[in-house]
Amino acid sequence: MLRKTICALVVALSIYVCAAAASSPIFPVARTGADGETRFGYLDDTGMTVLPYTYTQAGEFADCGLAAVENDKWQTAVIDRSGRLVIPYTDSPKSVEFSGDMVAYRYADHSVYYTLSGELIGSYTGAIGFFADGLLLCQDPVSCLYTYVTADGTPVFDVTYREAGMFSGGRALVQTTEGAYLAIDTAGQTVYALESGITPSYMTIFGEDTIVLSNGQNQALYSLSQRVFLTDFLYHTISEFHEGAAMVRQANRWGLISTAGRLLTEPSYYYLSYMGEGLYAARSEDGSVAAVDANGNIAYRTTSYAGGFDELRYGLSWHGTANGSLIFFRKNGGYFASLENAENPTLLSENIVRVTQDGKLRYINLSTGNIVFEQPTSFDLGGGITANTVHYERFMGFLEDGNPHGWDVDFPEISGLPDEQVQRTINAEIRAFFLEGPSASAEYEALEGGYGVSVEGSVLVVWANCVSGRGAGASVWNDNLAFDLHTGARYSVSSLFQSGYMDTVGQLLPAEHAIYLYSYPRVSADGVTWYYNEYQSETRRAYTERYLLTFAQLDQVIDPESALYNALHTPYNGMTETVSGFTDVHADHWAISFIQAVADAGLMHGADGAFRPDDLITAAEACVTVVRSQQLPSVDTPLAGLPADAWYTAEVSAAADAGLLEGLAAGFQPDTAFSRADTMQLFANLLVQQGSQLPDEQQAAQILAAFSDAGAVPAERRAAAALCVQQGLIGGYADGTLRPENTITRSEFAKLLTMLMEA
């Protein structure tokens, strides 16, 4: 999913000069969270975040030090390397292009130009390329004829042209409406008129004055200044020039030629293609593939070739091998690095490559071999539940542009549920949901994207975050599923409401869209979100508007007795069995390690398989656990007032006999809730029995002075409280209070007891 998303980004935010500056390179990285939202930020070669993940799309930095970014309102801006807005957010164009001194926003029928400092130059209908020799080439969208304008939009010439190229060195190639091909100067005067039957192969002047001409069968080079043919019509093909050289084909062999018409490399290659930065991919008769310069000098050569040699960026290129590895080589210097089990490389700096490796999207520093960023493939949802990403691809053929057509989708597989059958049921429905797609008709369309997932109360919500189709007419697919985490039952959003609820919903949603256009309502603990999905057009990608209606807004139509409403408002208790077999201890319970410790030591047992971690501990339970921890001997005579056959009588009597009940309320009440002050007294009694000394009144005052509510500690308990604080058994709260009167839960007591055992 991410690979396709990023490839789409490169198209959406295309860059005219696309190589980033050599100093301090930073590059865009897409990160998708469990919510399915993808955000872009910029990292450096070490993986440090330079610009935060705040953009919905982001392009690479151009040589001029600027990059195009997009926000969640489908607006585009241009930033510098510090993240400063050079051009503020505005309506997103189809593409953004950079030259050495300008930025162009390309819309469907016009382009808007800015300086590199963000100043508006102007808006021009049908603009092509950038200003050259002070003139901008424009094509009328109605007549399709070309003209040249100045920066203020004024046409330079009275005439228009059937075809035209940009100016270079004060001249441009045009075709008049009568069909004649001319070279003109910036005053519109004819410099050269082509002979009848000879046409320019490209409406471009290369070098100072060279043009490529065709006689209908072969091609030749012509000099405008010398007004002579630089070659005869010898070549079946002459490519466009790059850095003073063009590829030429004679019969089935390729070579290279200069703008002066001099053969730089004789036609001897079976195949040639321009890679960039003055290098060419060349296949020789012996089957080897090499990167060569215009003079045929070999920069890199291999006989083990499986794709690649497509592009040279940041002085690097790559090729695949038969064993699935990627080899990276330098423009000057040969072999640079290799990666195993990797594919789909995109070079992002002189060190960083983005690849799919072992099924994961990774950003790797080739110099160090370190993974500087890797898209997470699993998400912790809490309660012991994890969403693990599963990737699904279905190839359906190739498009006219050569790109693969099919499905490229991520969906979650849930783990960590205590009931394996419930987990299997939920995962089977999730898988079927994503593999069936948005509809029967959409099954034949491309589908690309991922998912979002969250736990809302005791409800698992899973949704698609995909685009169905390509180009104009493509649509967002963000339908969803909701499951009860305990039973695996699938919920319907409509079950939340009373009959006739859509009238109320219609009044709450914006009236700008008809109510039937809102789709895929998704539940959360906060309310229900409706979505308005807009199809992709020629000028704008498919997008979504979302509207959360809270339960307070929906109060009049909510059914508070519905199973879904109650599940959304009931926290999920991940029934994860511990070694001791408790079924009511959550996997993410804050005290699970303490509960496990006291259970393993046989100090706290619970009942009927439940520990009851959030129940208040009673006086009897507290005393029993301490007696067990100290292995105190039994006594023959029960404590007065206790039933002889009560489960706690023997241990409480032993505690009394050992002096552990000193300072507690007269007349022991076994079933009353134990307070923090009671706990401190019990623990202090034990510490004294073990040899500790109670602080005197002055020492106790100094120790308790740290707490703002020290005065709430009963006078007869101050020494005991001070000793527990001094020994580190009892601490205060974040607000600086001790709260001695507060009761204490079984899990809190388990923590204190564990600390006592470790003291």
Image: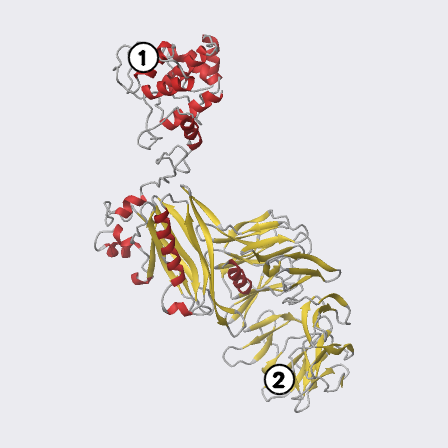
Q: Where 485 sits versus 630, above or below?
A: below
The amino acid sitting under disc 1 is Ala
The front one of 122 and 279 is: 279
The percent coordinates of residue 375 (x first, y second) are 53, 52
- Relative to residue 644, is residue 164 depicted above or below? below
List the single residue furthest toward the bottom.
196
- Res. 196 image quadrant: bottom right
Total tally of numbered discs in the picture? 2
| Residue under the point 46% across and 50% down | 388
- Label drawn at residue 689: none
- Helix, strand or loop for disc 1: loop
Residue toward you, 451 or 558: 451
Per the image, label 2 sits on a secondary structure element best described as strand
Indicate left or right for 433 with 362 as reference: left
Image quadrant assignment for residue 352: bottom right
Q: Indicate which disc, 1 or 2, sits on the residue closer to the N terminus.
A: 2
Task: State the residue position of label 2.
Answer: 175
Q: Nearer the viewer, mark 1 or mark 2?
A: 1
Question: Label 2 sits on what residue type?
Answer: Gln
Is 694 on the left-hand or right-hand side of 148? left
Residue 123 in the image, given as x and y percentages of width and height:
54, 68
Residue 82 in view here: no
- Residue shown at 55% from the left, 81% from the top: 145
* Type of colouring: secondary structure
Residue receiving disc 1: 665
Measuring from the top left, give residue 427's x and y in whole percent: 38, 53
Q: Is residue 724 above or below residue 273?
A: above
Q: CA distance from mark 1 to mark 2?
A: 107 Å
Task: Point out the residue furthest to the left here.
Answer: 499
Q: Is residue 418 visible?
A: yes
Q: Tell me the crowding category of disc 2: few under 14, some 14 to 19, or many 20 or more residues within 10 angstroms, Cα based.
A: many
